[in-house]
Image (spheres, rainbow, N blue to C red):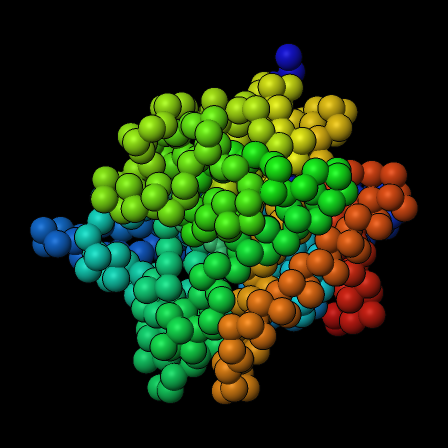
Amino acid sequence: MAQESLNPFEIALRQFDEAADKIGLDDGMRAVLRTPKRQLVVSVPTLMDDGSVRVFEGYRVQHNLARGPAKGGIRYHPKVTLDEVKALASWMTWKCATVNIPYGGAKGGVACDPKKMSRSELERMTRRYASEISIIIGPDRDIPAPDVYTDAQTMAWIMDTYSMTIGHSALGVVTGKPVGLGGSLGRAEATARGALFCIREACAVIKKPLRAATAAVQGFGNAGGTLARLLHEDGARVVAVSDSRGGVYSARGLDPGQVREHKTRTGSVVGFKGSERITNEELLEVKCDILVPAALENQIVLKNAGRVRARIVAEAANGPTTPGADRVLRERGVFVVPDILCNAGGVTVSYFEWAQDMQGFFWDEPEVGRELEKFMKRAFHDVLAASRRHGVGMRVAAYILAVGRVAEATRVRGLFP
Ligand code: NAD
């Protein structure tokens, strides 16, 4: 079997090129949209609790600003690289355009192991990183949010650091903040809830009631852990879940609320009572109707795509499926809800949060929920219609829509100077 590239930015460019070919984008526009607008690499010297100083490498990439300020999360992970951040930034551009919110795409990250750092070390590293990237972020310029191993507290530190720098409180500089600090009701669940709306629509397409469906979820954090609970509440049987330490399986179904309690107590889903231990690789091959990758990139690859037994793959994670695996899934008739659609609920409610911050006027939770459902359903059906019109899978269809929108904004703005 041919060796496939697992470089996330090369993968992002291949996905872009496929859509660009379909819509006949000219070479100049292609070159503009393939290239990140700004790439900032910063060193983040941090005082550790033992008195030593460590220097972490941090990144902030703004991929495209044609449709509005840049938007995208910040990831803390030992394997963060510039190419990963570039890929994630470009996926944010296409995601914001897919759900038609007025943002470009960005992403940030720090190569560090947050599990081995104390809270005060994390705070000092976050504040120094925020200060280093403050030259390009801001409510009208680039608005970070949480991603893997960052959360509402991380956002509060960034908001405070930025606000101290400019001399007044800037609520709109980050989203995913604590509700008491200009955060939006419903933001914590938004990524999972948005994915749930997509899964409901996908079940209707393949004519499988969600109530009668089984699901397996890889990753038990903000996206995966919450989605497992929402699927369970909707009547689906969640047969397998996992985190970085491994997975658990039960043909009878797991109660995600109890799994969450177990993880809070022990640090992992592994060892949950009445379950069988499985690996993360085995989870992807579990017999189920809905497979939800909700951890990291490159999980469904050419090597294992033929063994995926789900009928729907709902990509709560960014970039979980390689282009080669995507082709295999398509040939096998698996309905893939692509990341730039499936997990767009997070950035959509981030947009609502930012709009509330800028207006200083806050919505109640039902209103957030109603608007999210409206945005997600509209986007799902726009993508489905494009997929039928062009005779392509949902991923290429989402890119066709998104690339078309960003290209149009770029065209009408014109080339400066
Ligand atoms: P998180 O930090 O809350 O959770 C990550 C989860 O993945 C944890 O349970 C962790 O144990 C697990 N994990 C880590 N490495 C793993 C591995 N090798 N195998 C299996 N599990 C592993 O992060 P999150 O915010 O839930 O993000 C998860 C994915 O969802 C990422 O791809 C992220 O980009 C994407 N996403 C998140 C949001 C959001 O709003 N949080 C929005 C859109 C997309």
Kindly indicate the quadrant of the structure image that contains residue 337.
top right
Q: Quadrant of ligand 1?
A: top left
Q: Position of residue 360 (x, y in %)?
A: 50, 87
Q: Which is more toward the observer, 101 or 58?
A: 101
Residue drawn at (48%, 65%) of the image: 187
Count of labels in the image: 0
Up/down of 300 relative to 19, above or below:
above
Up/down of 216 relative to 25, above or below:
above
Residue drawn at (41%, 43%) of the image: 256
Residue drawn at (53%, 31%) of the image: 299
**In the image, 386: left or right of 153?**
right
Residue at far left of view: 50
Q: Position of residue 147 (x, y in %)?
A: 45, 53
Q: Position of residue 367 (x, y in %)?
A: 58, 75
Residue at far top of view: 1
User: Is residue 106 visible from the viewing direction of this image?
Assistant: no
Tell me the quarter of the image containing the N terminus.
top right
Q: Position of residue 363 (x, y in %)?
A: 53, 80
Q: Which is more toward the observer, 54 or 105?
A: 105
Tell me the quarter of the image containing the C terminus.
bottom right
User: Is residue 279 visible from the viewing direction of this image?
Assistant: yes
Up/down of 340 relative to 267, above or below:
below
Up/down of 222 relative to 357, above or below:
above
**In the image, 116: left or right of 307?**
left
Q: Which is more toward the observer, 4 or 194?
A: 194
**In the image, 167: left or right of 297?**
left
Kindly indicate the quadrant of the structure image that contains residue 78.
top left
Kindly indicate the quadrant of the structure image that contains residue 374.
bottom right
Residue drawn at (43%, 58%) of the image: 146
Q: Which is more toward the observer, 331 or 275?
A: 275
